[in-house]
Image (cartoon, helix red, strand yellow):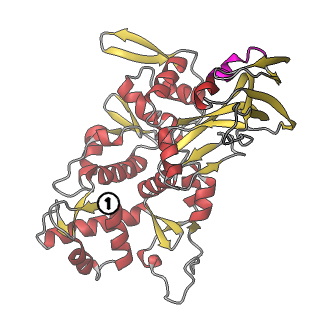
Amino acid sequence: MTTHAHALPGGSATSASVVPDNDAWVHEALRGQFRGWSCSRVHFAYPLDTRRSYLVELPQHVLSALEEREEIQFKGAQASTGAVLCTHERTYALQFRENSNALFLLDQSASASLENGAREPPALSLPIRMAMHGSVELTHTAPHVRPLRDLLAPHILKSGDGLRQPSNESSSSSADGLGIEWSIIEEQVLASAAEIRSTLKELCAVERNSGVWIRLDPDLVLETLSLLFDTIILQQWCSAAFPRDELESEMAKDCAHELVRAVVGLFCTPSERHTGWEQWDRDRLLRFSGEHLLEQRCSTSPDEELDFMSAWGKLLPDDVKPELGTLRGLFVMDRTRLKYTPYWRLSMEPAMRFSQLFALQSSWSRSEIEPFLKDLCGENEGHLDQMLRRHAKLVHGLGGQNYVARAPVIPSR
């Protein structure tokens, strides 16, 4: 540190101040903002605040959320996956970058005002009150929703009647003890509220009471869906659009009303043409029924594709045809046989994930391997490209470009 005297244009006075070496940039930056001041004096304030303070670089989405007073949460300070910042819709990874040079915070609160009739503009004092130790960069990342499966595992409902609650029962409790509170889910799952709710829907989880969630047993859901398909046919409704209230009324004699409403909510979307009518969410229906069948038929030994497709078609309405493309990331092909290998059972550590994938299949096209990495990369194509370059090798062959193992494959257990 050295002592310098500086003067800004518009005045002749100078003022000695203790400032960092090569501090001309400070005055250059201040010149436009404080035009009319005779000089600026930059000095260290005592005591200097040396607490661990950091700058946070906010993406536009986060800045907009703050300006709209949306709740922003930091989660996972103690988690092995690292802390994240969550808006209502997105999750951001936090990466600390230490400053290579000293970074200080100037305080403008000590500004003086020009006095009427003053012959010389007053001096401006800019004390340095805080040292910044680095910055935190936010990167849009995939939500860490895998813990949801474990959290919901003890709370699986096997009977539709269990959705009914006595009118005098507390809204946060249930007679059978099933259900996990939203506050626990939100605290333990490192993801935004919207991402958590989307995953809950994929897992066929529903809100049993206010703020209490349970997962519906897959067999119970399939049984209810089958009754829904049959009822639509018997009532001669078109499965592309059907009246919700009338369907629930017709189903009342076969199923609990709460169960029918829950399943319709999971697998239907409002019709664009008719108010109060519903239509099947085709991708959701295919993904759920297909994965359930994969788990049943292809977990212990592979199943022939033709046999699997035939069995799958029997679980669907007549106008919904099975498509293997909707099950990407849930199986690998061994010639004409399917093996159930869901991405969510693979390691969350990238190097081990690639070892497991290349143990399953020695060569992958980008379209084949990408669904098995989505939970690590999210929608960040740059992160996906970086991961592929680091852990796989791109080779060119007669069949096009494929990825193979860069290092010896660790056999999966």
Q: Tell me: residue 182, above or below residue 199.
A: below
Residue 242 in the image, given as x and y percentages of width and height: 18, 67
User: Residue at image x 44%, y 25%?
Assistant: 361
Q: Is residue 35 left or right of residue 18?
A: left
Q: Nearer the viewer, residue 204 or 144?
A: 144
Q: Nearer the viewer, residue 154 or 205?
A: 205
Residue 130 can be seen in this image: no
Segment colored magenta: 21-28
At label 1, the amino acid type is Phe
Quadrant showing the C terminus: top right
Write down the quadrant of residue 49 in the picture: top right
> Circle 1 sits on which residue?
267
Residue 3 in the image, given as x and y percentages of width and height: 85, 18
Q: Tell me: residue 136, above or below residue 158.
A: above
Task: Tell whether position 27 is magenta.
Answer: yes
Q: Nearer the viewer, residue 373 or 15?
A: 15
Determine the residue located farthest toward the left in the rendered image. Answer: 236
Q: Is residue 333 left or right of residue 354?
A: left
Residue 12 can be seen in this image: yes
User: Residue at image x 38%, y 48%?
Assistant: 291
Quadrant showing the N terminus: top right
Determine the residue located farthest toward the right in the rendered image. Answer: 47
Residue 177 in the image, given as x and y percentages of width and height: 60, 75
User: Residue at image x 27%, y 60%?
Assistant: 269
Q: Tell me: residue 389, above or below residue 247.
A: above
